[in-house]
Amino acid sequence: MSPTIEYCLSNVEEDVRCRLREVGADEHPCLEHCGICYARPFLVVDGTLRDGDDHEELLDGSRRETEER
């Protein structure tokens, strides 16, 4: 079962949005995490906020966790 991934439009660059769309992530104009949104990349995975150095790292980490289950 793949994770539910949500992202804020203002936090993700267009090239990464394409990859997120390919994996079925949900796009939102705002996820109400503005302080984090302005500071660093984040995704909400299965309802849990995850932040990191970049979105690719976060997406790859989410996929690895799913494969390990």
Image (spheres, grey):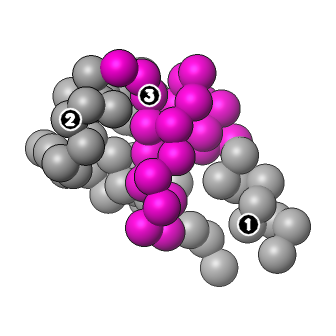
Residue 32 at x, y = what percent? 18, 48
Q: Is residue 10 above or below residue 62?
A: above
- Residue behind mark 1: 66
Which amino acid, mark 2?
Cys
Q: Is residue 1 magenta?
A: no
Q: Say whether disc 2 or disc 3 marks the residue closer to the N-terminus.
A: 2
Q: Is residue 34 left or right of residue 42?
A: left
Q: Badge 2: how crowded within 10 Å, few (<14), some, or many (20+)? A: few
Question: Residue drawn at (58%, 21%), measured in percent from left and top?
Answer: 53
| Magenta region, residue range | 39-60
Q: How far apart in space, not on screen, are marks 1 and 2 (Cα)? A: 27 Å
Residue 60 at x, y = what percent? 69, 42
Q: Is residue 38 left or right of residue 63?
A: left
Q: Quadrant of the C terminus?
A: bottom right
Is label 2 in a helix, a strand or a loop? helix
Residue 5 or 23: which is nearer the viewer?
A: 5
Residue 37 at x, y = what percent? 29, 30
Which amino acid, mark 1?
Thr
Q: Is residue 54 magenta?
A: yes
Q: Say whether disc 1 or disc 2 marks the residue closer to the N-terminus.
A: 2
Question: Residue drawn at (49%, 69%), measured in percent from left and top?
Answer: 46
Question: Which numbered mark, 1 or 3, is in the foreground of this view?
Answer: 3
Residue 56 or 48: which is nearer the viewer?
A: 48
Question: Which numbered mark, 1 or 2, is in the foreground of this view?
Answer: 2
Which amino acid, mark 3?
Pro
- Residue behind mark 3: 41
Question: Residue drawn at (57%, 30%), measured in percent from left and top?
Answer: 52
- Residue behind mark 2: 34
Q: How far apart in space, not on screen, are marks 1 and 3 (Cα)? A: 20 Å
Q: Is residue 26 above or below residue 50?
A: below
